[in-house]
Image (cartoon, rainbow, N blue to C red):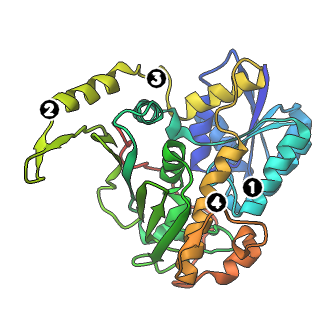
Amino acid sequence: MIKAAIIGAGAIAGVHAEAFIRFPELCEVRAVCDIYVEKAQDIIEKHHLNQAKAYRTMEEAIEAEDIDLVSICLPPSAHADNTVKALEMGCHVLVEKPMANSLEECDRMIAASERTGKHLSIVCQNRFKTPMQRIHKMLQDGVGGRVTHAVVNSLWWRGENYYDLWWRGTWATECGGSFTSHSVHHIDLLLWMIGMPDSVTAVMKNVGHHNSELEDVGMAILEYPETFAHIGTSIVDYGEAQEMIFQTEKGRLSIPWSPASATPLPNGFPKQDEAYEKELDDIYHSIPELELEGHPAQIKNLLLAIQGKEPLLTDGREGRKAIELIMAIYKSSALRQTVALPITEEDDFYRKETMIQKMPHFFEKTKSIENFTSTEITLGRDVGK
């Protein structure tokens, strides 16, 4: 039986708790930790973690409960140090996205995992959903031919008071706005689908959140040898419409699913190709639906990987890719230039301390509260459904 601890008792901790309790034959949550111990106790009671105790620190919980796996649900600035500490204390680690505040921190986490021989998994829960799995397989199988153009619209809405929470809204504590805090999931999916680009050109701005130094809208253009892509990010979009579109040589593959294809008329204008659209639709629906999706599916994979029964599907090197692209986006926007990848260790945007010196302060954070009165979160439209 794998003994697990949830580190951090914010809103996402409840999602992890509900996922863990679905696998009583594999694991048991023995601890929930938070500097506000009463919040940890609330998680235990709300999610009926009957074998768990509340602790103030991760170290105390690991030693007291002989923990095998920690699930880190802390602010991003606390991910790296706590991950390395947990790995060195003999625990496997699951970390919420974004993986860390910098590539240097990502590399420290990966090195600690490799040094200790313990699994490090980064939350990429959207990979474990049927629409994403279907599109990924179709792209890997070359359905439609080469991808010519990809579009990612990662559009969300957050009130101005979203940034009142103490750790949000500064480069030092959050190290990124909408690209990092929200669009990181879509960025991860894009890189999983078509890989890392050769270069990035980006712009960003803060148009609606005056208690934040960070961006709340942005656009990134990605160049590949034979593909062009762009990512739109926003937390000022009512309706939170989100989509991923992959235009291939023969037709469109998309999330949400909406196939399209055309053949050219003699003058080059399009004529709908209903036969190929049906072929695409048949292929899409021939790929089986997942029995388990999202956080539960990823956590089950990690639990089975710990037992040696499955390969780990989302390790530290997979999580690092999104951070590298985001750092290239920030570098491009801050310096107003096209940025080539990869980001090397000598680059100012490899380390947090030198990166944040280059970033603009759109506004200054003037209001800060320790906790919100409500921990309810809404996650917008479930992409693909």
- Confirm or deny contact between disc 3 and disc 2 (CB under 8 A): no
Neighbor class of circle 2 (other Cα within 10 Å; few <14, some 14-19, many 20+) is some
Most extreme residue toward the front is: 266
Q: How far apart are marks 1 and 3 (CA)?
A: 30 Å
Q: Residue at x 66, y 62 (%)?
A: 342
Residue under label 2, please give it. Answer: 274
Which mark is in front, 1 or 4? Answer: 4
Q: Residue at x 33, y 63 (%)?
A: 237
- Confirm or deny contact between disc 3 and disc 4 (CB under 8 A): no
Q: In which quarter of the image is residue 53?
A: top right
Disc marking residue 106? 1
Residue type, label 1: Cys
Is tag 3's residue or tag 4's residue first in the polypeptide sequence?
Answer: 3
Q: Distance between the residues labelled 4 and 2?
A: 40 Å
Is tag 1's residue or tag 3's residue first in the polypeptide sequence?
Answer: 1
Image quarter in which the N terminus is found: top right
Q: How far apart are marks 3 and 2 (CA)?
A: 28 Å
Residue under label 4, please give it. Answer: 324
Residue type, label 4: Glu
Q: Which residue is drawn at 57% across and 49% down?
A: 11
**Tag 4's secondary structure?**
helix
Is tag 1's residue or tag 2's residue first in the polypeptide sequence?
Answer: 1
